[in-house]
Amino acid sequence: MNIEEKKKILRSYSYYQEELERLYYQLNEIRIKCYGKVGVQAITYSDMPKGGTSPDMADEIANMVDLERGIIKRILKIHSKINKTDKAIEDLNDIDMIRIIKLRYYNRYSFKNISKKIHLGKTTVQDKHKIALELLKL
């Protein structure tokens, strides 16, 4: 894998975090709707054809469960990608390189801000960044 492909994977980390937040929110909304449906509901009747009949609650809950399973599947897939990336970074075995990669791609720091944060020169940070990308096994 070349350096640009590795950078692309590392840049996607922030997107994955945002996507996880969105998916967890959706999952919570589905659960609220689903558990809200389980409670007691009044049945109304009318003289109109099919009037007053509510959709089959079991079908509605089954649909929500299917949605929930789909979201959980996507969440697990994203967690797997994040864990793989985290492991590759931790395998660098150089604390400066690990911090540089995490600050650069997880926190979106510039090289200037990274150098201030970890008290290394900007050129040293850029050099260590380049070496880290070459060593990184994604």
Image (tube, helix red, strand yellow):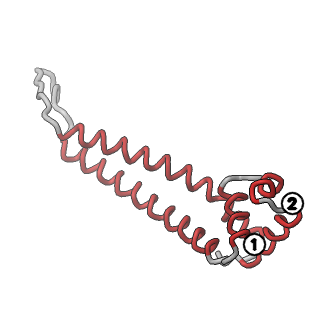
Tell me the tag on residue 133. 1
Tell me the tag on residue 33. none
Between 49 and 52, the residue placed more toward the observer is 52
Residue 26 lies, with reference to residue 115, above or below; the image says above
Q: Quadrant of residue 45?
A: top left
Q: Quadrant of the C terminus?
A: bottom right
Residue 67 lies, with reference to residue 5, above or below; the image says above
x and y, in percent, of residue 90 in the image: 61, 73
What amino acid type should be assigned to the residue bearing mark 1? Leu
Task: Please report the residue visible at 79 percent of the width from the left and 75 percent of the height from the top.
Answer: 131
Task: Please report the residue visible at 75 percent of the width from the left and 73 percent of the height from the top.
Answer: 132
Task: Please report the residue visible at 61 percent of the width from the left and 53 percent of the height from the top.
Answer: 15
Residue 138 lies, with reference to residue 22, above or below; the image says below
Q: Which residue appears farthest toward the right when viewing the image?
A: 123
Between 135 and 56, the residue placed more toward the observer is 135
x and y, in percent, of residue 38 in the image: 18, 41
x and y, in percent, of residue 40 in the image: 13, 34
Q: Left or right: 48 with respect to 75?
A: left
Q: Left or right: 13 with respect to 70?
A: right
Q: Quadrant of residue 53?
A: top left
Q: Left or right: 108 with respect to 41?
A: right
Say which residue label 2 marks: 122
Residue 96 lies, with reference to residue 29, above or below; the image says below
What amino acid type should be assigned to the residue bearing mark 2? Lys
Q: Residues within 10 Å of mark 1 (few under 14, many from 20)?
A: many
Secondary element at tag 2: helix
Q: Left or right: 24 with respect to 51?
A: right
x and y, in percent, of residue 22 in the image: 49, 46
N-term mark: 1 or 2 = 2
Secondary element at tag 1: helix
